[in-house]
Image: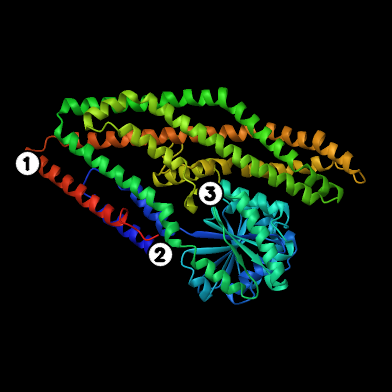
Amino acid sequence: MLNTQRAYLSYLEAVIKLIGETPLQTNELQLLKEDISHIELLVPVIGAFSAGKSSLLNAFLGVDVLGVGLTPETELATELRYCSDPHLLALRSDGSSERLNVSGLANIKARAREFTHLQLYLDNPHLEALTSLVLVDMPGFGSSLANHNKAIAYYLPRGVHFIVVTSIEDGNITQSMMRQLDDLQTYGRDFTFLLNKVNLRSEEQINEVSDLISEQIKSAFANVHPLTRVGLDDGVRLADLLTRLEPERIIRQLFEDRLKDLTHSLISQINLALTSLKKNQAENEYALSELADGIRKVERKRDDILADLRNQQLDRMVERCVSDSGRELENVREELVNAGLSSNQEGFSRIISEVVRSAMTRTIKDQMEFISRSVVSDFTQSLGNLGNAMGAFNNDQNWLGDMSDKINRTLHKTVETVGHWSGSLAERNSRELEKLKKDNNWKEGQPLPKVTYQGLTTILAVTTSVVNPLIELAIIFLPDILAMINQGRQRDQLRQKVMNEIIPAVKRELRYKLPTLLNEQLDELVAQVSAEFEREIGEKQRIIDELMSNRHQDGQAKEQQVAHLLSVRVELQGLAKETLYKQTQP
């Protein structure tokens, strides 16, 4: 476990103990503890089919365990993990898995269609030394379209850093690779570029290719992405690169803001409790009435917002997505024509899939960011009276603004813990409901337990929930589109076919499939934002209500309670200053 993880867990344990005898709840603290305890930092290694990814990883491990030269159809993403008991886990989309001996790795990939990915556990000192980093050998860009899309869909939102490998034999960054890098940038993922197999070229040729690739990266991406040359020393180079990834910094990126928000929320709750203890019964009852009215306003506003999104935003969003995808497909028409002339249907499909994924990801992310801010703003405006009332009650005029800022920050995070990316939003809610049924001994005929959103999904999660199933559908309808390509056509004829039939056909399919997917995610987004506002308001209700129920206590007991809360606040602020706000080394 990393030092930052230990520090954060110690902080949470101290806070849970500190607030144990106060009206404050510890549910969110426990959930955050769970996330920090089980976080994994996935580092996918991506590149073309013949870039030498598996050979590079074998060199790092010091043993040839990953197959090289496999046929593209048999590739599966393979996570490399440390365990004193070596074994292989093959995971399916339904969550089930099959355990095999490590030797089964050579044969299991022939059943690639059955599984989403593999986890290879090895008793290897190099893996043991990684500490929270999990390397992933990804299917090459030349692997089957289904395997490639399956791996990209799973790891693009989960990877914390990507190692991009290209062979010096390619001479530059291919168009396909540039589209993958563009997706990484859209998701806010950082990457390091490895120029592999440099031992196969002269120093002059190496410098020439290095300069060209460096210029390609510089012109396409604002951030600096250093180019690392790798030859016969590939294992050592990869080990050096991994030590520079700074996992401690990544952990801070993942959790520091969540911890600060949670601490700020606890301090606000303490302040509210102190205020409530100083107010008379009539003032507290008025505050409770305003809070209850606020929840009713949120519920009414939710329906209005959903109706407005369906009537005003959905069609506009679909047309924007279709238009952007069509334009970008037109931009690669010559690439499509070349694939068609060579009768490379797999390559033709790959270009369409990559272009549509890249265009859709950027467009949906941009549109969802705008819509989410609008939704939060609409809810905030509907609660204006409550904001004024609670500002007067608690002498905190920024309470409503702070709440909406916190929700916006959560929605627009570009990094997320691995556990928050498991399946679609609907699937996640369904699992939570089943868990609540079991925990509450629910029986048929009783009201269903209410699913509470312990943490908002992010805009990137929503984007992923639209794009991934859309690309899966694209793989289904692409064969019908490819049937339009007849062998023996001339370049001009095929170009006209691409522009007048194939691209319009893709746009028609997108226009048909998109509304349902977008509508589901817009509903989920509004429901979650609404639930978060309700949770924040309900939290205030619970504290005031609990303190009012104990108003029979004498003056001395009340003074002791006030003194205790003041002491807890001071100690909490001290813990936060030491753990979350102390100056860290860059």
Residue 218: percent from the left, percent from the top? 60, 53
* Mark number displayed over residue 188: 3
Say what amino acid the circle numbered 2 marks.
Answer: Leu
Q: In the shown orientation, is residue 195 left or right of residue 253?
A: right
Scheme by which the image is coloured: rainbow
Quarter-of-image position of residue 36: bottom left
Cα gap from disc 3 to disc 1, whole angstroms = 55 Å
Residue 151: percent from the left, percent from the top? 63, 54
Residue 59 vertical placement versus 170 (above, below)? below
Front-most of residues 174 and 386: 174
Q: Quadrant of the C terminus?
A: bottom left
Q: In the shown orientation, is residue 218 left or right of residue 402?
A: right
Residue 418: percent from the left, percent from the top? 49, 53
Q: In the shown orientation, is residue 295 left or right of residue 178?
A: left
Q: In the shown orientation, is residue 442 left or right of residue 480?
A: left
Please give the residue where the numbered disc 2 appears in the rendered image.
Answer: 2
Say what amino acid the circle numbered 1 marks.
Answer: Gln
Q: Which badge, 1 or 2, comes first in the chain's sequence?
A: 2
Cα gap from disc 1 to disc 2, whole angstroms = 46 Å
Please give the residue where the numbered disc 1 appears in the rendered image.
Answer: 556
| Residue 447 makes an appearance in the image | no
Q: Which badge, 2 or 3, comes first in the chain's sequence?
A: 2
Quarter-of-image position of residue 580: bottom left
Check disc 1 and report its element: helix, strand or loop: helix
Question: What residue appears at the point 26 percent right and 43 percent down from the top-left corner?
Answer: 267
Circles 3 and 1: CB distance less than 8 Å?
A: no
